[in-house]
Image: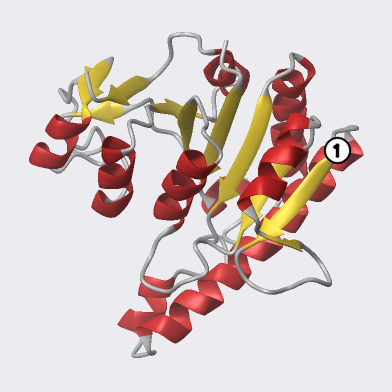
Amino acid sequence: MYKRVLLKMSGEALKGNQSAGIDSKTVLELAKQVKQAHDLGIEIGIVVGGGNFWRGKTGQELGMDRAQADYMGMLATMMNSLAIQDGLESVGVSTRVLSALNLQQVAEPYIRRRAIRHLEKGRVCIFAGGTGSPYFSTDTAAALRATEINADALLMAKNGTDGVYDSDPRKNPDAKLFDHISFADVLAKNLVVMDSTAAALCKDNDVKIVVFNMNEDGNIVKAMKGDKIGTLVDNN
């Protein structure tokens, strides 16, 4: 069983069956699964995207300045982080939201040593605001935070995808699911795990990744416990 993990999920995972926004029932079910793992003594960090509200690349495609659009995306992650915090505390889990942006009315500033101390005290840390800089995705933020807090694994919770395939399973019914694959192969074959910056950061710092389907009941707990699930990506 892992001692400390970083759970990365997309913002879309929070919208449930809605077209956008946050579905409170979905957040509550997520909180209940995280609580199960937390009750086992696992130290948990969380990074969530903001795609259920806004994506920086979408803004760029609409003619916006990319940096401005990315800052809007960081604010979207803040809304999602506060929703997850509320869900976790409603089931009795102590949390802290730590933001890469200066929003002290609703979150603590991200300070690495403070985050680690919160984790050691049994608090779930929700890292909001991405990296705090434009042009970086929340995948990269997750890789960075996982490295900084010395997480045993970065858990990539996918919305309906079972792991890493050799091709798009939605287009190719014969696509092969990998149980295990190296970072070198992921980067060389341009496989869809996370963006290349995030993958390179994990490779260089030897942070293992587990890619799994979060929509199957109990999978978040299984991933945090270190059960064999989805696809393991590492340097071996």
Q: Which residue matches tag 1?
A: 94
Is residue 211 visible to us here? yes
Whether residue 216 is situated above or below residue 84 in the rendered picture: above
Res. 111 image quadrant: bottom right
Query: Depth check: 188 or 179 in front?
Result: 188
Amino acid at pointer 1: Ser
Q: For the point 21% across and 32% down, which residue is it? A: 183
Query: Depth check: 122 or 161 in front?
Result: 122
**Label 1: which secondary element:** loop
Q: For the point 21% across and 37% down, which residue is it? A: 168
Q: How far across and down, in percent of the image, does residue 147 sit?
A: 46, 40
Whether residue 55 is situated above or below residue 166 in the rendered picture: below
Whether residue 110 is situated above or below residue 105 in the rendered picture: above
Is residue 21 visible to us here? no
Q: For the point 33% across and 31% down, which residue is it? A: 206
Q: Is residue 91 left or right of residue 97?
A: right
Q: How far across and down, in percent of the image, does residue 219 sit?
A: 56, 20
Q: Quadrant of the C terminus?
A: top left
Q: How far across and down, in percent of the image, does residue 110 sit?
A: 65, 59
Q: For the point 19% across and 39% down, which residue is it? A: 191
* Residue count near mark 1 (Cα–Cα under 10 Å), binned few <14, some 14–19, many ≥20: some
Q: How far across and down, in percent of the image, does residue 10 sit?
A: 51, 48
Q: How many marks?
A: 1
Q: Is residue 12 left or right of residue 177?
A: right
Q: Quadrant of the N terminus?
A: top right
